[in-house]
């Protein structure tokens, strides 16, 4: 492996060839810095540059952007294969699946659904239906306006920024949504307030549907906007003045498990013990996730407090500087000579 070529001026890093050794080295390097990606005080670009530096120490010369792009591709393939395996399809193989699952499994499959499916097979009664009811289909094209992933995230950002306005009882909700639509129109195609409200209501209904399915099946939702929409819904009391779509009642009651019970050849006590063991594992996984979320929330809160303290310090310094300038000006006036007569 050759290193960076030296020439006149900046050092040029040759484009990396992602062979098996390079990919495994990348996965190992990402694992070294994995917790940093959840630290709100650190920038992603800086972390990927650190990953690239770690790669260079192993003899693989690349840029942070190279590592970021390759990791995204690996993660996308991993999630696609994981979804198939959770649903009982073991025919699809991915060379780096185990290495990635070691890092990402706790985050993406915290309930261990993949292991359950691989060891026992997935009963049809617990496999979520891949078809979504028509009432919950994603609203992607509303009267000519295309709701891309970036536009949806911007919509959620602007809704969060209007938290105080939504919380004010006598606020003009129409004006709030018009302001949100105006901000979206400035960065993309023109969109009106009613389209923004319909999109939010669609996201809200989809959130309810995915939460109900997750509660009924125990499968972690892989909907792209699940975490973000849940965060906004729990933080902001979003109010609208357009008609809410008809809601569909989704039953979260467990289906009868007679077929599963009849397949158990052990005494009832043994089956009950396995059920309790599965429940204990579920609780342990949930507690692990909660602890991790609490740790991340603490980091974010510490970062927010640090930024707020920095802002207050800057304001204080500006005031002190202004006062020093005033005092300096007053001293100069006192030191000026008094011109008398001849």
Image: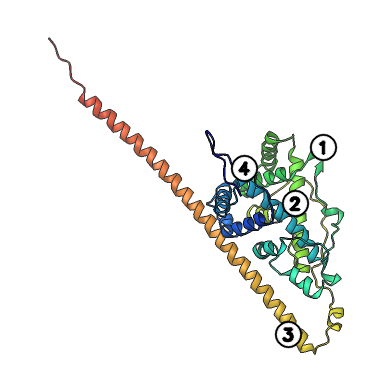
Q: Where does label 3 land, which residue?
A: 273
State the colouring used for the structure image.
rainbow
Mark 2 or mark 1: name the one nearer the start of the chain. 1
Q: Which residue is mark 2?
A: 203
Label 2 to label 1: alpha-carbon separation: 19 Å
Residue on which disc 1 sits: 144
Q: CA distance from mark 1 to mark 4?
A: 44 Å
Which tag is nearer the camera, tag 2 or tag 4? Answer: 4
Work out whether mark 1 precedes mark 3 in sequence or the reverse, and give the earlier one: 1
Q: Is residue 121 visible?
A: yes
Residue 257: x and y, percent?
Answer: 84, 78
Q: Residue at x 60, y 51 (%)?
A: 60
Mark 3 vs 2, N-terminal side:
2
Badge 3 element: helix
Q: Nearer the viewer, residue 243 or 153?
A: 153
Q: Residue at x 72, y 62 (%)?
A: 97
Element type at marker 1? Answer: loop
Q: Which label lies toward us, 4 or 3?
A: 4
Pick the quarter of the image with the C terminus.
top left
Where does the image place residue 7, in percent across and percent down from the top left?
A: 54, 36
Q: Is 340 situated left or right of 247 in this image?
A: left
- What's the mark number on residue 14? 4
Relative depth, front residue between 171 and 231: 231
């Amino acid at each position: 492996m050759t290193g960076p070529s030296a020439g006149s001026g900046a050092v040029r890093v040759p484009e990396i060839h992602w062979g098996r050794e390079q990919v495994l080295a990348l996965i190992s390097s990402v694992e070294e810095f994995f917790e940093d990606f959840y630290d709100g005080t650190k920038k992603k670009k800086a972390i990927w540059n650190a990953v690239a530096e770690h790669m260079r120490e192993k003899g693989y010369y690349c840029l942070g952007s190279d590592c970021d792009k390759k990791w995204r591709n690996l993660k996308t393939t991993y999630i696609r294969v994981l979804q198939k395996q959770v649903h009982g399809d073991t025919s699809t193989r991915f060379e780096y699946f185990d290495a990635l699952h070691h890092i990402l499994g706790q985050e993406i499959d915290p309930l261990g659904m993949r292991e359950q499916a691989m060891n026992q097979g997935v009963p049809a009664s617990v496999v979520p239906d891949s078809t979504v009811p028509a009432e919950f289909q994603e609203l992607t094209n509303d009267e000519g306006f295309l709701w891309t992933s970036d536009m949806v995230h911007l919509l959620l950002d602007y809704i969060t920024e209007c938290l105080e306005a939504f919380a004010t009882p006598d606020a003009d909700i129409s004006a709030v949504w018009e302001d949100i639509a105006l901000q979206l129109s400035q960065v993309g195609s023109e969109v009106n307030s009613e389209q923004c409200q319909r999109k939010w209501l669609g996201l809200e209904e989809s959130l309810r549907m995915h939460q109900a399915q997750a509660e009924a099946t125990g499968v972690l939702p892989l909907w792209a906007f699940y975490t973000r929409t849940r965060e906004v819904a729990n933080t902001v009391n979003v109010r609208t003045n357009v008609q809410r779509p008809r809601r569909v009642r989704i039953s979260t009651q467990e289906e009868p498990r007679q077929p599963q019970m009849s397949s158990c050849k052990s005494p009832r006590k043994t089956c009950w013990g396995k059920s309790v063991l599965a429940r204990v594992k579920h609780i342990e996984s949930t507690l692990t996730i909660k602890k991790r979320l609490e740790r991340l929330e603490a980091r974010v809160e510490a970062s927010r407090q640090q930024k707020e303290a920095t802002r207050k310090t800057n304001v204080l310094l500006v005031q002190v500087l202004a006062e020093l300038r005033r005092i300096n000006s007053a001293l100069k006036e006192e030191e000026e000579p008094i011109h008398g007569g001849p």
